[in-house]
Image (cartoon, helix red, strand yellow):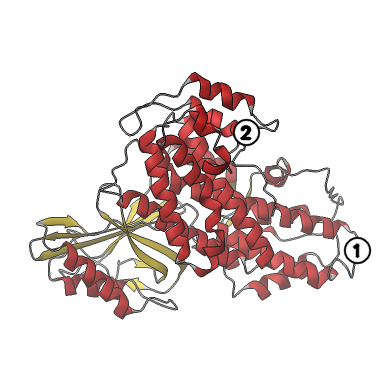
Amino acid sequence: MKKGQNKCVMEVQINYLKNVPSDDGDFLLKWSFSSMKGVIENLKCSNRTITGTENDIIEVLCNEVKLYGTKITKQNLKFTLIQNITNQKKKKEIIFGTGFVDLSPFTTVKIKREINIKIKAEKSDFSFECHLTIWNKNTLTDITYANNSDEKKVKMVRFKQTESEEEEEKLISKKVGNDIEVPRTLEDMVNDIDDETDEQLMVVTYPPSSGPIDLQEIFDSLKNMKGDFYCTDNFIELLKKWWSDNDAHIELNIIPISMEDWIDCVWLIKIMETFKVIKFGYEEENNIESQCKLQIEKILKDAKKRLTKLVQERVEGMLKNLILSTAFDSTKSNFEEGIATAYVRFISSVYESVCQISSTYANSFIRQLFHFSIYSIFEGIVDSHNVDGSKGFQLNYFGICIQNEMDQVTVLRKYREEFIPIIEVSRLLTMPLNVDLMKLKEEVFPTVKYNLLLKILQEFKPGNSNPNSIPKSVFKFVSKHLEQEPIPSKYDLIEN
């Protein structure tokens, strides 16, 4: 490496690569990364683009994005790229892909950022651009690849925090000494969880002097190990040391809130379940209660709550555009197909990961997640006053796309019936409604509660797709059959 040049650590492991059409007709390269290590150095480029044949582009992608330990080989990645570039080549100018990545699985990354990949074609020439931005304290590493020069570079740029991020930074931590970052106060960080925990179920008391635990060791261990399923044994050894006195330690309550991504939570839950058995045996073998055991149970509970929250946030982000879209064109349905594909692939990844904890827990978790997804859509279209015939046709197509995608994933096939409520509500919005139809509710939309029917119908707006207004007699009929229980919510717990 030449003097003065920067060095960037970046070796990418791809979990999947899928071309998904975006809402404006362009293609999205969907990436999911699970590790980051190795070295790319001496990158230098002035214009951020290259010009050449499709083979030039493919070689850049295949060489710069290293395929270590994945199901995707360099050969089939090439095939995918060649196929898509060839299919789009007839157009004078196209954007082959704008991709993005969730950087949260990187243990060195504190805040999620995006990778944007654009491949642009003009006649027979192609240009390629890849821009990577990674959060690293107050500095962003800005990497741009190019193939039109032997000289390449890594450029370090400053990142200006937004007000919200500055506030978040102040709330999360403060500097102590030169290298150690600790919570603003230990009690405050513990309260972040305690406020949401039902203290009636478990009460953990902390002795005035519960034994010193090195905070730096906790932070460093989590930074280096969380999310890495090859480090579970090493972290269990640390837990043995930290709880060797069988006391509760307030310092250890920071562990679950240090999980920044859902896969980190899966890692922690798996470790804590294993450690609990190692230390106390199975429940039927050992019912001895201790402050140490209560704290371990509390950390497990908080980790599961955090897993649920982080996965739900990802799902809401995926479904947001579907909820807010106000038009549906059956001749250009790539938008709904793209969301369905991304959604099912994410759910499949979550299911396979959570199965590492237990298949029973995975089944319960995924069914609850499907309920959350469906009722997020229902609540979303009602809250945004986006209920009409067009939305009905869109939801019907989306529901079918979801079920088709699930049929392609063996482990999810058994859950395809979970999305029947989406199909049933779509019927409600696309059919001319009258009292005679409502009397056939148990045949037309049996799983939808009358309470929810009324809420949706109250927001219905006649339009081109369904110009029929709803007669008052329908509202009277539905009102007479309302259930006593509250309107179903996305946060309801379902029976398994």
Q: Secondary structure at mark 1?
A: loop
Q: Residue at x 27, y 68 (%)?
A: 43
Q: Is residue 277 visible?
A: yes
- Find residue 120 and report its image quarter: bottom left
Q: Nearer the viewer, residue 46 or 91?
A: 91
Is 495 left or right of 266, judged from the image as shown? right
Q: Is residue 345 visible?
A: no
Q: CA distance from mark 1 to mark 2?
A: 40 Å
Q: Nearer the viewer, residue 19 or 246?
A: 19
**Residues at circles 1 and 2 in contact by the CB criterion of under 8 Å:** no
Q: Residue at x 44, y 46 (%)?
A: 319
- Find residue 21 and report its image quarter: bottom left
Amino acid type shown at disc 2: Ile
Instruction: Indicate the quadrant containing the C terminus: top left, top right, bottom left or bottom right.
Output: bottom right
Q: Residue at x 62, y 67 (%)?
A: 355
Give percent across and percent down for residue 34.
48, 67
Give percent across and percent down for residue 373.
53, 47
Q: Report the mark closest to the observer, 1 or 2.
A: 2
Amino acid type shown at disc 1: Asn
Q: Secondary structure at mark 2?
A: loop
Q: Residue at x 30, y 72 (%)?
A: 64
Question: Mark number for residue 487?
Answer: 2
Q: Considering only vertical position in the picture, is 244 above or below 451?
A: below
Q: How many labels were placed on the picture?
A: 2
Give percent across and percent down for residue 226.
59, 64
- Find residue 342 and report its image quarter: bottom left
Is 213 left or right of 440, judged from the image as shown? right
Q: Nearer the viewer, residue 89 or 210?
A: 89
Q: Which residue is mark 1?
A: 287
